[in-house]
Image: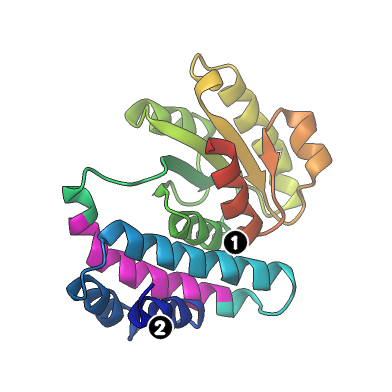
């Protein structure tokens, strides 16, 4: 692997947003394949996720790394499209009805995108039916991720998952849930496939679910 690719890895992990796009271009000019460049950045984000889980870094550092990765992906997008796309699949994400919190959800979206997925972000205060509609609009979706950040919106999360569990496409998707008051026990009780406690774990779990 070239020194440029190693430098790209380091700069993504360090969250150097201004330097990453130029380095991506340098790697391409040096003959690296777009997909290899993308995978190098994904592996940098894997390292960031590990550091976060080990409490070596915190949310702000993870956010700047995800932003740096995003800037690099913008350079690659046209080239990856020419190659016929390389996405691991689509993930629909949103915060459930009645809940206006978006920082955690945005961080999860960025980390999942950094892991190589195409993310469809429905925003906050999402009515249960909107998750179903979004799937109908994107029937190649592999994961639907729902977030609830308040104990008062846990019933809305339960209802949204219940509605998804009734759908004819349920066998084709995995449902992920998360948020401050949510536990693995609650996730299992309401019929979700997976619960993760932070954004780095969410990205790792998403990859595992579609493997």
Quarter of the image for residue 9 reads bottom left
Q: Report if residue 67 is visible in the image.
A: yes
Q: Nearer the viewer, residue 66 or 126?
A: 66
Q: Main secondary structure of the magenta part?
A: helix
Instruction: Answer with left or right where residue 180 lies relative to residue 43.
Output: right
Q: Is residue 68 magenta?
A: yes
Q: Secondary structure at mark 2?
A: helix
Q: Which residues are magenta?
A: 62-79
State the residue position of label 2.
7
**Residue furthest to the right:** 185
Viewer-nearest of discs 1 and 2: 2
Residue displayed at 83% across by 39% down: 185
**Residue furthest to the front:** 1
Residue displayed at 62% across by 47% down: 205
Where residue 192 appears, as percent x and y from the top left, is: 68, 32
Where residue 163 appears, as percent x and y from the top left, is: 59, 23
Q: Report if residue 97 is visible in the image.
A: no
Q: How many numbered callouts?
A: 2
Quarter of the image for residue 145 reads top right
State the residue position of label 1.
104
The relative height of residue 75 versus residue 140 in the rendered view (above or below) is below
């Amino acid at each position: 692997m070239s020194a440029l690719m190693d430098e790209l890895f380091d700069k993504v992990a360090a969250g150097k947003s201004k330097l990453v796009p130029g380095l991506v271009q340098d790697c391409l000019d040096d003959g690296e394949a777009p997909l290899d460049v993308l995978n190098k950045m994904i592996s940098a984000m894997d390292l960031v996720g590990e550091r976060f889980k080990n409490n070596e870094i915190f949310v702000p550092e993870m956010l700047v790394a995800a932003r740096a990765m995003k800037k690099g992906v913008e350079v690659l997008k046209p080239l990856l499209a020419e190659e016929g796309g390389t996405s691991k699949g689509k993930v629909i994400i949103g915060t459930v009805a009645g809940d206006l919190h978006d920082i955690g959800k945005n961080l999860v979206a960025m980390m999942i995108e950094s892991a190589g997925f195409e993310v469809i972000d429905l925003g906050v205060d999402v009515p249960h039916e909107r998750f179903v509609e979004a799937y109908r609009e994107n029937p190649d979706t592999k994961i639907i991720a729902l977030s609830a950040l308040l104990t008062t919106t846990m019933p809305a999360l339960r209802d949204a998952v219940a509605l998804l569990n009734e759908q004819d496409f349920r066998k084709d998707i995995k449902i992920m849930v998360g948020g401050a008051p949510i536990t693995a026990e609650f996730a299992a009780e309401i019929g979700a496939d997976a619960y993760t406690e932070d954004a780095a774990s969410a990205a790792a779990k998403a990859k595992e679910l579609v493997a």
